[in-house]
Image (cartoon, grey):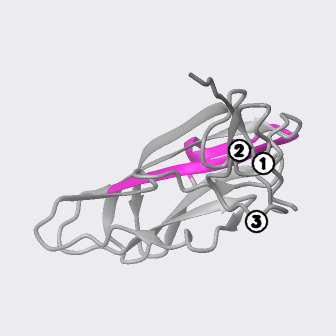
Amino acid sequence: MTDFAIAPMYNYAAGLTGGGSAVALGVRSRKTLQLPPHLYMPENGQPFNLAVNVGITGAGTRVTPPELRFQIPPNCYGTVAGIDFDLDGIVITSRVFWSLLFNGTPVQGFNALTVLGRNGAASVARSVGSGAPLGLVTALGSLISMSILDSDGGTYTAGTQVYGWFWPQDSGAGYSPED
């Protein structure tokens, strides 16, 4: 029987885009299976979980709740693994949008998330990344936040949860999104 130790790893030079391992790179003597730290929390990683329910009212109203702000420590990378959101108080239809921000800048592809409420539904919900981690990586020491935009002028309660982890740059993970 062979024992394998789990250790984080990501190697752009080898062309691995996830799920890579030391065995795949030909390093067989170490018997170490290394997983990418942006998809699997490393042993020295620390989780974060931000959640809030906030009331929103008025067409064009944008809120960035302080409960949905998290500063990744200096010299650490962060990853957003998932986002859950729901909307309560729907009367007819709704047009409310959530935007994920890194250092105040919208993350492409995650800057107009919505649940699009429908007639007769008092509450709607959606999860992004619940089946597999999103793996959205921040730069070192980034600020993660969410903003919520009420574009139709309705009065709602918007629930939001953002979760993931961060890990030290010098952890030996062999990963740098700047590479």
User: What number of labels is visible?
Assistant: 3
- Of mark 3 and mark 2, the one earlier in the sequence is 3
Residue shown at 85% from the left, 40% from the top: 169
| Residue for badge 1 | 26
Mark 3 Cα-neighbour bin, 10 Å: few <14, some 14–19, many ≥20: few
Are the two marked residues, 3 and 1, in contact with CB atoms closer than 8 angstroms?
Answer: no
Task: Give the position of the C terminus as an image quadrant.
Answer: bottom right
Range drawn in magenta: 65-86
Nearest the eye: 153 or 132: 132
Q: Residue at x 30, y 73 (%)?
A: 116
Amino acid carrying mark 2 in the image: Val
Gap between marks 2 and 1, in whole Å?
5 Å
User: What SS does tag 1 mark?
Assistant: loop
Asked if labels 1 and 2 touch by Cβ distance under 8 angstroms, the answer is yes
- Give how far apart the Cα atoms at labels 3 and 2 are: 14 Å
Which residue has dot 2 on it? 23
Q: Amino acid at mark 1?
A: Gly
Q: Give the numbered dot on residue 15.
A: 3
Foreground: disc 3 or disc 1: 1
Residue 132 lies left or right of residue 139; in this view the side is left
The quarter of the picture where the N terminus appears is top right
**Magenta-span inclusion, residue 2:** no
Q: Which residue is at 83% across, 45% downward? A: 174
Indicate the secondary structure of the residue bearing disc 3: loop
Assign a secondary structure to mark 2. Answer: loop
